[in-house]
Image (cartoon, grey):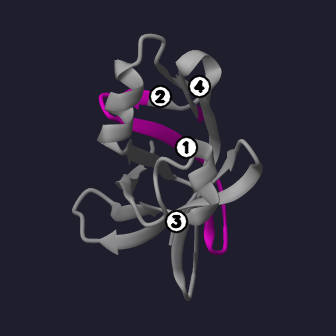
Amino acid sequence: MMTPQDVARLHWGIDPHFLAYVGSLPDGMIEAREPAEQRDHDFLFPEVGTQPGRIQFAGAIRFFGHGGLLEVLLQDPAIESDKNGSILTVTGPSGRAAMLNLRTTDSERGTLFESTLRGEAVQWFGGVYLPGRPFGQVRICRRQSG
């Protein structure tokens, strides 16, 4: 059980093919918005709250290209879990929605999830990426503060 001294961060390794695609565009831009930050291919989000079955994180990532035809803002991710499994939700272009299905795998550095894109999020990427497509690793890392 998490104590007030525990500090968690979400490390989201967004699909490297998507990052490379956006980065290759003449006007392509990938930006992390505070308090999120980018480290190499990972985006880090600080935990801002928990409730049963939900861990909330703060910050945003913006993807831009093609003169604005590609513009996706993913804000304030949360991991939600119940008896059916876990999902990653974000506030996206059409409001709060489930973006990724998460499957837990083993990790010595925290809880690690493999992710796949959900149908609700396909429209955010212009229908290019289909439901079920792998979309990177998601990891929750905890450390004791103090």
Tell me the CA gap for discs 3 and 1.
35 Å
Instruction: For the C terminus, give its image quadrant.
Output: top left
Tell me the CA gap for discs 2 and 3.
24 Å
| Secondary structure found at label 3 | loop
The location of residue 24, given as percent across then percent down, is 34, 20
Label 1: how many residues lie within 10 Å, few (<14), some (14-19) or many (20+)? some
Q: Is residue 77 above or below residue 75?
A: below
Label 4: how many residues lie within 10 Å, few (<14), some (14-19) or many (20+)? some
The residue where tag 1 is placed is 125
What span is in magenta? 38-60
The residue where tag 3 is placed is 2
Tell me the CA gap for discs 2 and 4.
7 Å
The residue where tag 2 is placed is 37
Res. 33 mark: 4
| Secondary structure found at label 1 | helix
Q: Going 48% across and 12% down the picture, which residue do you hit?
A: 27
Q: Nearer the viewer, mark 4 or mark 1?
A: 1
